Image (cartoon, helix red, strand yellow):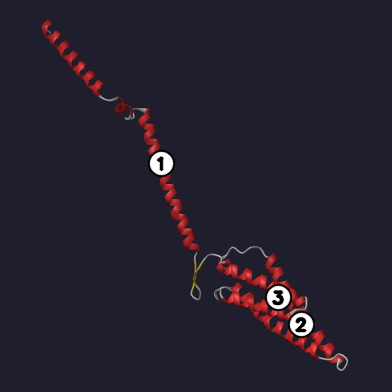
């Protein structure tokens, strides 16, 4: 190269470098700081991908919770849509009423037991007929009603008999009435004891 041409190339290169440096000086510092470079850019990308993944997991969890709630809803043709555990709650309340009926029968209060057994039967009538357990406890309640009526009738009749004039008849009514009270009360108590000792049912019948 000619010595004059080499000097001109050096001057031109120097001007380009000075213009580039001047353009960099005009850029604001916050703008440079806000642009991720190298490893900072990769870290920002990872954070963004991680936040997107967390959002996706949250949305899937919300949708799965909604699906579980939807599956737990029980729809029977006779009762319509009921919350989860509706029939189990009715059976539990009916068992409490039957326990009261059993205790009052064994204590000799058949009129109180009659009311308690009627309450148990009324509660179970609010549940579905598509449940075998509802049928079982409904049968217990309805079978206890005539036993309570019979025991009440025998006890009331024995109270109207004069023991001095008809002692034999009086004793018969008292003994038969007491036997009816004991038999019905103890039978219901045995049913309740077996139900209490049974393991919890996780099938659809527990609804």
Q: Nearer the viewer, residue 26 or 51?
A: 26
Q: Tell me which residue sits at (47%, 62%) in the image.
A: 70
At 17% from the left and 15% from the top, the residue drawn is: 15
**Which quadrant holds residue 156?**
bottom right
Residue most toward the bottom? 165
Taking depth in this image into account, of 18 and 105 the one nearest to the observer is: 105
Q: CA distance from mark 3 to mark 1?
A: 61 Å
> On residue 101, which mark appears?
3
Q: Is residue 89 above or below residue 58?
A: below
Tell me the crowding category of disc 1: few under 14, some 14 to 19, or many 20 or more residues within 10 angstroms, Cα based: few
Looking at the rendered structure, the secondary structure element under dot 1 is helix
8, above or below 135, in the image? above
Residue extending farthest to the top is 3
Q: Tell whether label 1 touches label 2 (CB within 8 Å).
A: no
Q: Is residue 45 left or right of residue 172?
A: left
Asked which secondary structure carries label 3, the reply is helix
For residue 180, the mark is 2
Vertical position of residue 146 compared to residue 19: above or below: below
* Whole-percent x, y for residue 85 in the image: 56, 65
Precedes in sequence: disc 2 or disc 1: 1
Earlier in the chain: of badge 3 and badge 1, it is: 1
Quadrant position of residue 117: bottom right
Q: Quadrant of the N terminus?
A: top left
Q: Is residue 123 left or right of residue 169?
A: left
Q: In front: 2, or 110?
A: 110
The reply, left or right, for residue 71 in relation to residue 117 is left
Calculate the distance from the C-alpha at mark 2 to the C-alpha at mark 1: 72 Å
Instruction: Measuring from the top left, give residue 83's x and y in whole percent.
Output: 52, 66
Closer-to-camera residue (194/26) = 26
Instruction: Tell me where residue 116 appears, x and y as whole percent.
Output: 67, 76
Q: Which mark is residue 161?
A: none
Q: Which residue is label 1 attached to?
A: 51
């Amino acid at each position: 190269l000619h010595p004059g041409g080499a000097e001109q190339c050096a001057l031109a290169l120097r001007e380009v470098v000075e213009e580039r440096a001047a353009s960099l000086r005009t850029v604001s510092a916050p703008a440079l700081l806000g642009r991720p470079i190298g490893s900072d850019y990769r870290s920002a990308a990872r954070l963004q991908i991680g936040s997107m993944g967390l959002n996706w997991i949250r949305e899937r969890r919300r949708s799965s919770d909604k699906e579980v709630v939807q599956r737990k809803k029980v729809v029977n043709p006779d009762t319509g849509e009921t919350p989860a555990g509706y029939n189990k709650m009715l059976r539990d309340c009916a068992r409490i009423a039957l326990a009261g009926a059993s205790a009052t029968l064994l204590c000799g209060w058949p009129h109180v037991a009659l009311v308690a057994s009627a309450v148990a039967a009324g509660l179970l009538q609010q549940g579905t007929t598509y449940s075998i357990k509802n049928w079982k406890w409904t049968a217990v309640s309805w079978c206890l009603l005539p036993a309570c009526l019979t025991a009440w009738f025998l006890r009331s009749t024995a109270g109207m008999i004069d023991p001095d004039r008809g002692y034999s008849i009086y004793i018969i009514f008292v003994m038969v009435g007491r036997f009816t009270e004991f038999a019905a009360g103890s039978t219901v108590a045995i049913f309740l004891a077996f139900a209490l000792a049974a393991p919890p049912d996780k099938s659809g019948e527990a609804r």
